[in-house]
Image (cartoon, rainbow, N blue to C red):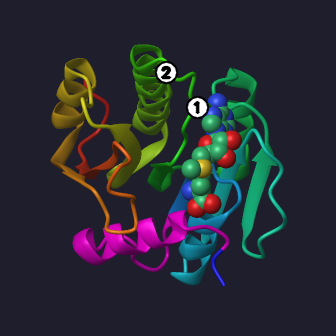
Amino acid sequence: GWRSRAAFKLIELDEKFKFLRPGLKVVDLGAAPGGWSQVAVFRKATKVVGIDLLAVDPIPGAEIIQGDFTDPENMDILINKLGGKADLVMSDMAPNTTGHAATDHIRIIDLTKDALIFALDILNLQGIFIAKVFQGGSEKEMLDTLKKSFKVVKHAKPPASRKESKELYVIATGFKGKPE
Ligand code: SAM
């Protein structure tokens, strides 16, 4: 079985946008407890590397390291383990909430921005970037970068995402290369 409710969110996003083709090299950011990586392996990704602050029980076919994604050393480790470029960078990272809405908002935007900067460096052309954002939203600068760098940029809230939660996902497909 899937290890997380989040697994269903990825499956539902894929039902809508059809990005989980076989043979992908995938990076899973904020991977614990491992649902998204499980889904990627099940969908015949050829390589799945991930990271989380928390330890993840082994998933055959995936390699998840424990650490802080925002630490540049860990970004290098991920790149080395990937051994080449990625076709899909997906981030379900969410910082611990403080209860202070504005602070929480800035934190999630910062994490997602880091994930995007990383994706711009390691994605293959035509690659895909998926990330959790919050309503209120993908702030303008990030959305501008996304629109410059990808052919299609969409937002979606999968049915498995609780209605009362403000989370939604950005799905950017057709990576055009790093903007100048
Ligand atoms: N997609 C996962 C699944 O299907 O099992 C669920 C991910 S959970 C909603 C969000 C995760 O992001 C948490 O496990 C948290 O530890 C992780 N996270 C938050 N900040 C992080 C960071 N700076 N580096 C690595 N992981 C982080």
**Mark 1 within 8 Å of ligand 1, using the beta carbon:** yes
Residue 20 image point, x, y percent: 40, 73
The residue at the point 78 percent across, 76 percent down is 60
Is 70 or 104 nearer to us in this picture?
A: 104
Q: Considering only order in the chain, which callout, 2 or 1, is on the residue closer to the N terminus?
A: 1
Q: Tell me the element at label 1.
A: loop
Residue 70 position (above or below residue 36): above
Q: Are marks 1 and 2 in contact (CB under 8 Å)?
A: yes
Which contiguous range is marked in magenta?
A: 3-24
At label 1, the amino acid type is Pro
63 is within the stretch colored magenta:
no
**Amino acid type for the residue under numbered disc 2:** Arg
Q: Nearer the viewer, residue 15 or 129?
A: 15
Instruction: Identify the disc placed on residue 95.
Output: 1
Separation of marks 1 and 2 at Cα, in angstroms? 7 Å
Kindly identify which residue carries mark 2.
107
Q: Residue 146: x and y, percent?
A: 24, 35
Q: Is residue 21 above or below residue 97?
A: below
Quarter of the rendering containing residue 16: bottom left
Image coords of residue 155 (percent x, y): 21, 50
